[in-house]
Image (tube, helix red, strand yellow):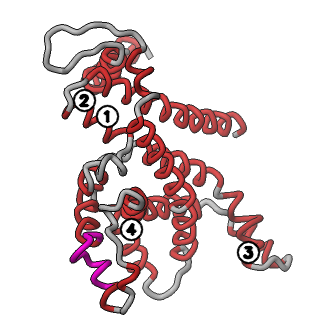
Amino acid sequence: MNKFKKKWWIPYAFLALPITFYIIWVIIPIFQTFTYSFTDWDSISQTFNFVGFQNYKDLFQDYYFLLSLKNNFYWMIGFVFISIPLGLGFAMLMDQKFPGHKVYKSLVYLPMTLSFVVIGQIWSWILEPRNGALNTFLRAIGLSNLARPWISDPNIVTFSLIAAALWRQVAYAMILFLAGLQGVSKEHVEAAYVDGANSFQRFWHVILPELRPATVIAITVNIIDSLRAFDIVFVMTRGGPFYSSSVMANYMYIKAFHNYNMGYGSAIAVIQFLITLVFIIAYLNNVLKKEERE
């Protein structure tokens, strides 16, 4: 025991380097961002002026920021109300041991191996208005009236981007639910079957309640991912046309690094951080309550 007491510093020595890097690359930039959000710094000058809450006041009078916030809300709806049910449906299907189920599972999971940058490039080719795969296919089968300028029409561009992102996000939700299905009690399902419950009743009253932890994780992660949306927007549209597909992260990038208004961009980043933090705290609170019950 005395040996261990004398070497109490060893665990801290192993943690010192990663903690140092975490402080340098995460904690310090967070504090810097909060500080810059109260200034008019242009990211070039050596000096800057404190302007108080002026950046935040301007934000909520900025049409394009409010549009970006609304688009993030659309992303959130898509990631929660489309990705989660589809992911659960695929998980229930792939959990069955039918011939070739492993191959189909791999095909559904395949988009998860790609980054959003690659996915954005692929879907740019698919949704390209003139010669894109989707419009070419629609014209080939006589449905040319359904062909649209998917990523150049301000009215539908955000929904086109969300559809492209869902290709990957559904696969992620499927994996979470597949992991959750491994913990579902087979005895409870079989008991419900013996009691005469049909397939829907077994799913609704037995399987779904036991998938609650996986569902909470899937919803929380999908909400956070919807708020972090940036790369696929940047690759496919740069936030255009006319900011119609812009999201908070994209608008922050434009303001901070294109327009050299780091103070205003930092204020956008702070708002995005605080909204995300609400969902993270809610998730952690749920996890802690679950641990207390156990």
Residue 227 image label: none
Earlier in the chain: of badge 3 and badge 4, it is 4
Identify the residue at horizontal 27%, vertical 7% (top origin).
49
Earlier in the chain: of badge 1 and badge 4, it is 4
Task: From this view, report whether residue 181 is shown above or below residue 213.
Answer: below
Helix, strand or loop at label 2? It is: helix
Of all residues, the one furthest to the bottom in this rendering is 141
Give the quarter of the image for residue 64: top left
Q: Are marks 1 and 2 in contact (CB under 8 Å)?
A: yes
Position in image of residue 136 (x %, y %): 27, 83
Amino acid marked by disc 1: Met
**Neighbours of disc 3 within 10 Å: few (<14), some (14-19), many (20+):** few
Which residue was labeled with disc 1? 252
Amino acid marked by disc 2: Ala
Q: Are marks 1 and 4 in contact (CB under 8 Å)?
A: no
Residue 135 counted in the magenta span: yes
Which residue was labeled with disc 3? 200
Amino acid marked by disc 3: Phe
Distance between mark 2 and mark 4 Cα atoms:
36 Å
Give, as a single range, the part of the protein colored magenta. Answer: 127-137
Residue 256 image label: 2
Which residue was labeled with disc 4? 109
Distance between mark 1 and mark 3 Cα atoms:
46 Å
Task: From this view, report whether residue 94 is shown above or below residue 119.
Answer: below
**Neighbours of disc 4 within 10 Å: few (<14), some (14-19), many (20+):** many
